[in-house]
């Protein structure tokens, strides 16, 4: 299965991001803490070049805490500051401005020496769709400025937003890349809700999720779906979940579309606990 999703506004956003870079001091790159590698757009490195950056691992509350720590260490080793945050509750957000100040200390000292008056830090927030950029901005600004939604592609234009006296943010639409070279990257993005469900074969996505859980979190799988032991095949597991959840059609046949919906909803909604779908040691 090849997943591709590159609406016209994303191509436009890429051009606009490039044009605005000269106004920016620092980049806040927002990623999904459950898939910190797959939710990083490889085009971002090319676009922002050598600008200072902070990687913000959002949705850390629904990611496996131990792996989040490993990912922060991974990014630090790559020379990038990384922070775990939750834009919904505000956890970790106070550290963002302090980290930005630290990274920009030398730049602002040079400006001061040249007689330039102090000004707020100008930051650009970039990230793929549905990773929580608008929610983060609203949290930081303490008001509903940026439009939010549970579907990818809500933000379609850039806007400057003041955050107190120390920070100005340039919001950008979520930018995916034209084609995912690795099928598994596309499946992870789909499983966590970064790609519109309407363009996907959701059964493939659900099967990928179940296979991953059976391999990495078998006890969670057993507990959620009341299993004595894991079934010998994914099709048997699908049937079991269908019967357990009452996903039946006339005549008692299992409605596999409904089973698929249940599985994806459970995974996205944290019903199987905190999950991380990739480890730093597997991406190098």
Image: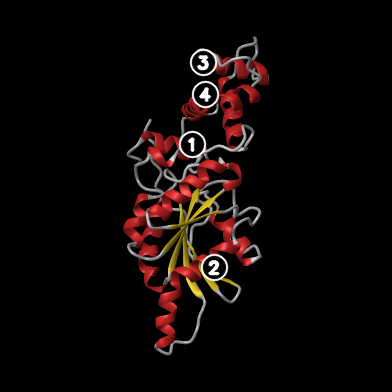
Residue 1: x and y, percent?
38, 30
- Which residue position holds label 3? 235
Q: Tell me what residue is drawn at x 52 percent, y 48 percent.
A: 130
Disc nearest the viewer among 2 and 4: 2
Which comes before the other along the chain, label 2 or label 3?
A: 2
Could you give the CA–CA distance between mark 1 and mark 3, rounded to whole angstroms?
Answer: 22 Å
Question: Which dot, 2 or 3, sits closer to the camera?
Answer: 2
Is there CB contact under 8 Å for labels 2 and 3?
no
Residue wearing tag 4 = 214
Q: CA distance from mark 2 to mark 4?
A: 41 Å
Residue 228 to residue 154: above or below: above
Provide residue 88's location: percent of width, then percent of height.
Answer: 63, 53
Task: Choose mark 2 or mark 1, whichever is in front.
Answer: 2
Precedes in sequence: disc 2 or disc 4: 2
Relative to 211, 240 lies left or right: right
Decide if residue 182 is on the left or right side of residue 100.
left
Instruction: Determine which residue is flagged by label 1.
Output: 277
Q: Which tag, 3 or 4, sits closer to the chain's start?
A: 4
N-terminal of the pair, mark 4 or mark 1, is 4
> Is label 3 in a helix, a strand or a loop?
helix
View extreme (bottom): residue: 115
Q: Can residue 33 be seen by looking at this rendering?
A: no
Secondary element at image label 2: helix
Asked which quadrant contains residue 98, the reply is: bottom right
Structural distance between the alpha carbons of marks 4 and 1: 12 Å
Foreground disc of the pair 3, 4: 4
Q: Secondary structure at mark 1?
A: loop
Q: Is residue 215 left or right of residue 19?
A: right
For the C terminus, which image quadrant?
Answer: top left
Alpha-carbon span between mark 3 and mark 4: 13 Å
Q: Residues within 10 Å of mark 4 (few under 14, many from 20)?
A: some
Q: Earlier in the sequence, mark 1 or mark 3?
A: 3
């Amino acid at each position: 299965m090849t997943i591709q999703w590159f609406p016209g506004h994303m191509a436009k956003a890429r051009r606009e991001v490039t044009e605005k870079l000269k106004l920016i001091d620092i980049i806040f790159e927002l990623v999904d803490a459950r898939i910190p590698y797959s939710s990083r757009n490889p085009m971002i490195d090319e676009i922002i070049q050598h600008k200072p950056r902070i990687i913000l691992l959002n949705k850390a509350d629904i990611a496996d805490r131990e792996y989040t720590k490993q990912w922060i260490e991974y990014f630090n080793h790559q020379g990038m500051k990384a922070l775990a945050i939750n834009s919904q509750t505000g956890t970790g957000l106070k550290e963002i401005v302090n980290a930005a100040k630290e990274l920009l200390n030398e730049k602002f000292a040079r400006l001061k020496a040249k007689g330039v008056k102090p000004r707020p830090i100008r930051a650009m927030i970039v990230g793929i769709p549905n990773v929580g950029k608008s929610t983060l901005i609203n949290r930081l600004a303490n008001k509903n400025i940026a439009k939010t939604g549970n579907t990818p592609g809500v933000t379609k234009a850039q806007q400057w937003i003041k955050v107190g006296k120390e920070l100005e943010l340039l919001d950008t639409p979520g930018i995916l890349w034209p084609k995912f070279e690795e099928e598994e990257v596309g499946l992870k993005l789909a499983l966590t809700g970064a790609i519109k469900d309407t363009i996907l074969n959701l059964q493939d996505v659900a099967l990928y999720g179940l296979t991953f859980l059976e391999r990495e979190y078998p006890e969670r799988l057993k507990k959620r779906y009341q299993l004595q032991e894991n079934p010998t095949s994914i099709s048997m597991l699908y049937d079991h979940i269908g019967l357990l959840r009452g996903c039946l059609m006339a005549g008692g046949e299992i409605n596999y579309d409904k089973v698929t919906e249940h599985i994806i909803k459970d995974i996205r909604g944290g019903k199987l606990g905190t999950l991380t779908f990739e480890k730093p040691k597997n991406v190098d």
